[in-house]
Structure formats: structure tokens, C-alpha cells
Amino acid sequence: MSLRFDAISNINNTETAVPASAKITGIFGTNVFTLKTAREYLSDEAYKSLITSIRGGKKIDRNVANQIANGIRAWAESKGVTHYTHWFQPLTGTTAEKHDSFFTLKGDGTAIEEFDGAALIQQEPDASSFPSGGLRATFEARGYTAWDPSSPAFIIEIGQGKTLCIPTIFVAYTGESLDYKAPLLKAIEALNKSAVEVCHYFDKNVTKVTPTLGWEQEYFVIDEALATARPDLIQCGRTVFGAAPAKGQQLEDHYFGSIPERVYAFMRDFEQESYKLGIPLRTRHNEVAPAQFECAPIFEEVNIAVDHNTLLMDVMIRVAKRHKLVVLLHEKPFAGINGSGKHNNWSMATDTGVNLLAPGKTPKTNLMFLTFFVNTIKAVHDYADIMRAAIASAPNDHRLGANEAPPAIISVFVGQYLAKVLSDIETRVSTKFDEQDEAILKLDLHRSIPELLLDNTDRNRTSPFAFTGNKFEFRAVGSSANCAISMTVLNTIMADTLKKFKADVDAIIEKGDKKEIAIMQVIQRYIVESKNVLFEGDGYSEEWHKEAERRGLPNLKTTPVALDAFVTDKAKKLFENNGVYTHVELEARHEIELEKYIKKVQIEARVMGDLAINHIIPAAISYQNELLTNINGLKSAGLAESAYKSQLNILKEVSEHIQVIHDKVNAMVEARKVANNIEHSREKAIAYESIKSTYFDEIRYHVDKLEHLVDDEKWTLPKYREMLFLR
Ligand code: ADP
Ligand code: MG
């Protein structure tokens, strides 16, 4: 019996392990070395030093580091931990760990458990097997991980095993960053600096601005046995073949439906694991597509939120196994039904407790809101190409612009109230703008910005970057992506724009204008300069694509070309001026992203070939043989051709599809040989993109036709209707 039927017949025998209910507050953060825990386990000196380094990024000296390490070990051991690891986010897109035990032998052979400051602060994983984009040659694999005190240590539990994880950044000995976190931390600092300066126009008490992130993670869940019978899911994370089921998502009954029991048990289980790790999950629900779900936490500081999202993805994959389920984080696991995204809700908060993207209660605080609001629009307008590059990946190419997800055109949605506010400022602020005009306009604006914008912002689901009342939502981010990439870009472009804003306002003040007037004038100019990027309509529509073209907005549909924006002079200047990436680092990242793209498409092409030749064609031929036996039998029984005309037609049809599939798979192999000989990564990626667009859909078309024709019992790959609806 094929894996497929084995899986189907076993589905109802799968026991659902239901986790015991636990009060969230009782388990929240129990596996995290929180400040409260630190207070308990550290001396006053060590605790103070830890706090300063968290707040101001100040270096911790060796002696104190030893004390902190000892405290962390004491805590971890009290929880049964035996090993520790530096936990980091290399550019492969997953997380990495290398476990070492506390256990060690002293010179005289005594066995002891030890974790000293040096081990806390720095470790040397073999960097050669992580992608570096040519930053280090493999023979000089010198990279190290360095403790990031701003993200707390935590304990990962796998079965009975418990490991202490120290969040770290990963850098080369030459100083270049080799991970997602190091540049993110720099971008956060750059934003902090420029945002604080701009805040001082309104409030001198602000000393720190922290970007905030609340991600929404979409994912699919399917039965493990069914997934195992699909080599494409196992190897590529998506199905490369599969005919559309009679019932897909057209009834939209999944979205409103109750959560299936098995999935519900899984959700509660991974939620509990997440709570222990301090991930503040808040919502869970079904998504539009069958077997698609979403979860979202309460927002946190960007740095922590990024760690929590990567951690959550790990936890989900692991916990799913316990439930004999598979989580698909791929952006487009199934053709013809919605893909998955990871909306990044983003804002900025001051240490005085103000959300800079929430409208204020007074005209003055409203001006502060408008300043940050308009600067965000300006930033996205000026750097739309880099925003696009930030979300570019082979899997996200399937989603962007597929009439279900935001298009590859970056635009900003602000909602009708704010659109009106912007156009009022645009028309009413002029160079002759004086104090009286200012007073009137401020009051008018104050009246036209409803205090509770949150409930007054219309929802536009088709915009890649939408204002949602007190934050912007970057919707074009892919579900499998590390949020750090888009957050690094967003915070950097914001830092840069605010810096320019400050300079522009100061220049007017120097000429003798009042501060508020200067601010209004620059805001007005920024609105004029960036209104091209504002779009309130349907982002999925054909008209928008035409309109965007008229406006000259870029619409780069594929990753190999979208990534160009990372290495333009503009990008190099931006990232270097803000201390986020050096030229060399940008070039390296560009190279790595291209390589990732090439490899992903290459793997998919191979899997397609394997499946076509080893699964599809054999099933089709076996069916042909059955038809032939039938036809010959009918013939020898003396029946006229009309008795087996249909069989002959099916036979012919099956033959035709087999021929096309076989020819195309061979042609694709040849095209890959040509592509593999291309030296330059960008050209090679473009060649692979062309392989994908030339062959993938075509081969798939014929395979899916065969799925409809061939005897169901001979079909070895689980079908869409099974993967999506059986659980
Ligand atoms: P929805 O977008 O579905 O209406 P919410 O508005 O409640 O849902 O929030 C969606 C996500 O945005 C949540 O993760 C939430 O924590 C996050 N969020 C809310 N406020 C902010 C903020 N100031 N900064 C960043 N994220 C935020
Ligand atoms: Mg949302």
C-alpha cells in the first residue's frame, strides 16, 4: 500500500495529546532569566551592572561577568539544566545553537560544573558552515558569538533535556556581522538617536525611543503522515504539484469556523511552551484558507519581538511533532489558495510612555504624532525599493502580487481621516504661513483627527504598508521570514529620515521662524514630496498596477532583481551613514540572499523532476496498462470500437501529458546545467528565475491534469483535498 493510503487510513487513529490547562500567569516567563530572577540570583553589583548594560549597552567587565554567569548557572541548575548554548540567528534564516555542558574536568581530574564569564560573553562556533557571502573564506573560519544582554537568557526544554540559551550576535573576527541580530541592534540604536532628537522639539524629558513590533504569524497545519508522503513538502516546504480540490476556500467557511480539535490541542500546547519562554501570545484563530491559522502576541520592543518570533517558529515545529502534525511556515505551501504572511505591526515608544504613532490628546502632542507619521510616509516613499528588497525571497515571490497578498508595489495606506488631514496641511501651509495660520490649522487638525483613531481607521487588507490607528502594519513580510530584515530596514530608513527632518527644521528655525512653524513647513514639504506613495484603493486591482506605473512606483516582481536595491549607492550611503551595514556587509548580504534564492529554486526544480519521473509518470503508465488490458479484452470479446472509444481517448490524453512532462523535465535539466555554469550570482539567480517561470507552471499543469485522469488508487501523492481537510 502506498504511503498515501496508509496515512489516510491512520488519520482517525491518531491520539490527541491534550495538554493540561495551566494558568498563564502561573507559567509565564518561568524559563526566562528575567530581571526579577536576576534580582534574586545576582549580587547588587552584578545586578546593577546587568541593568546598565541592558539600558545603555555598556560593557560588562570580566569580574562582574563571572558573577552574572554564576548567577545564571545557579538559576538554570535549579531548573535541571545541564547544558548551555549561545543562541543566534545566522543568515540561513533559522536559529543556531551549539551545546556545551557545564560539566568539565579540572587539571587534577575532579569533575565540576562550571560556567564562567568568558563562556557567557563569547563563544566560537565554527563559522565556516554558515553563509557569509564571501566575508570569510572557509579555511579561515573565524567568527564568534557575543552575548546580547538586552535579550534575556532562556531555557529550552526538549523532552527531558533542558538547555540554557544565551541570546547572542554572530560576528566575524574582522568585525563584520554574520547574522540578523547585529545589524538590527545597530538600526534600533540609530533610530533611538534620531528619534530622541526630534522628540526634543516637543518634550525635553524623552531620553530614549524604542521601536516596537507586534508580529502576526500565519501558518498551515497538516497531518504528519500525509506530509511525509509528499517529498515536495518535506524538501521544499511547499507542494510543487497538486490539482485544486473541488472545495477549496471558496465557501470561506474555515475563517469563521471553530478550530479543529487536534489543531486546538496543538495550539494550546505550543502556547504553553511559548508562555514559559516569555512569549506573550495573545490571539489564535483560523485563517481564510483551509488548514491555515494565525497567532499573534502582545507587541514588544523590536529586539525582543524578533527573538520571540524566531523562537516561536522553532517551538511550533517541535511541538507539532508531539501531535503528529506538521507546521508549514512556507509563504505558499498550496497553489490556488491563500499563502501565509507575517504582518509586522510597528511603532515607536518613548521612555516617557508615549506611542509616537498614536494621535495625541492636545494640539501639541498631535503635532508630535503628525511629525512621526509624516516622517514614516516619507521614509517609505524615499526607500520603497529597499523595503521591497527586505521582503524579497524565493517563497515570498509566490505570494506578493498573487491577488491575495499585497502587491510587490510598495505603497502606504493611511485611511480617510488622515488622508484628509494630509491634504489640508498640503494646501494650507505655505512659506508665508504665520503664527495665526498655525493656531487655526492646529485646532482644525486637532478636530479632524479623532482621538480614538484606532476604531476610526478603515481597514484596507490589500495594502503592503497600512496605518492601523496607532501603528503601521508592514503586511508584505513573508511568513517564514526573520522579522529582523524588515525591521532593520524600517528602523534605519526612519532613523535617516528623522535626521534629515531635524536638519530641515533647524535650518528654518535658524532663519528666524518659530519652531512650530518650521515643523509645519517641513511636514508640508514632506507630504508633497511623498504623496506619490499614498494609495487608498484596492491594491489587488489591475487599475492600481497601471496607476502605480504612471506614478513611477517600482513594481519588481521577482527576488533576483528586487535585491538590487541593497547594493545601490543610495543603499550603501543610507546604511553606512546610520552605522548599520558597511559596504562590504551589504555586498555580502546581497550575495547570500541571491545564493539562497538560487538554491531554493534549484531544489524545487530537482524535486519536481524526481516526483514527475518517479511518482507521476509511473502512476500514469500503470493506469495506461490497465486501460490497454481493458481495451484489448473488449476488442477480443468482439465488441465494436464504440465500446472502448472513451478508454482510447483517455489513453491518448494520458500519453500526451506524459510526453510533455517528460520533455519539459529533460529540458529543465538542460537549462539547469546552463544556469549552473554562470559565475555571477545575480545572473545565475535570474537564470533560475527564468527556469522557474518557463517550466514550473507548465510541468505542473500537465501533472495536475494527470491527477484528474489517473485512477485514484494508483496516485501515490496525497491530494490537496486530503492534506487540507483531513485531520
Ligand atoms: P488587528 O491588527 O487584528 O486589529 P491589533 O490592533 O490588536 O489587531 O494588533 C495587531 C498586532 O499589533 C498585535 O500583535 C499587537 O500587539 C500589535 N500592536 C499594537 N500596538 C502596537 C504598537 N504600538 N507597536 C507595535 N505593535 C503594536
Ligand atoms: Mg492585522
Image (spheres, grey):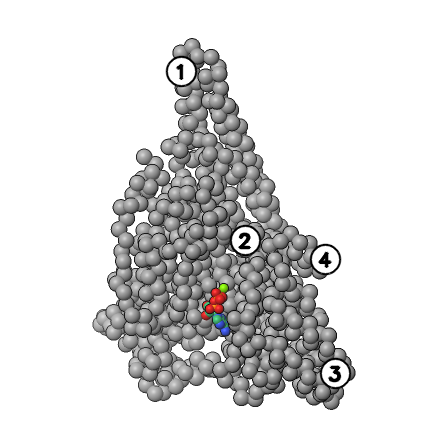
Determine the secondary structure under disc 1.
helix
Residues at discs 4 and 3 in contact (Cβ within 8 Å): no
> How many residues crowd mark 2 within 10 Å: few (<14), some (14–19), many (20+)?
some
Determine the secondary structure under disc 3.
loop
Q: Is residue 469 visible?
A: no
Label 4 to label 3, Cα distance in Å?
A: 32 Å
Location of residue 683 with respect to 33 vertically, above or below: above
Tell me the residue that label 2 is attached to: 404
Determine the secondary structure under disc 4.
helix
Q: Which x, y percent locates residue 16?
A: 28, 53
Q: Is residue 345 visible?
A: yes
Label 3 to label 2, Cα distance in Å?
A: 45 Å
Q: Which x, y percent locates residue 326?
A: 37, 52
Q: Nearer the viewer, mark 1 or mark 3?
A: 3
Label 4 to label 2, Cα distance in Å?
A: 23 Å
Tell me the residue that label 3 is attached to: 433
Relative depth, front residue between 134 and 383: 383
Relative depth, front residue between 690 and 671: 690
Query: Disc 4 marks which amino acid?
Result: Arg
> How many residues crowd mark 1 within 10 Å: few (<14), some (14–19), many (20+)?
few
Residue at 34% x, 68% y is: 275
Say whether residue 433 is left or right of residue 93.
right
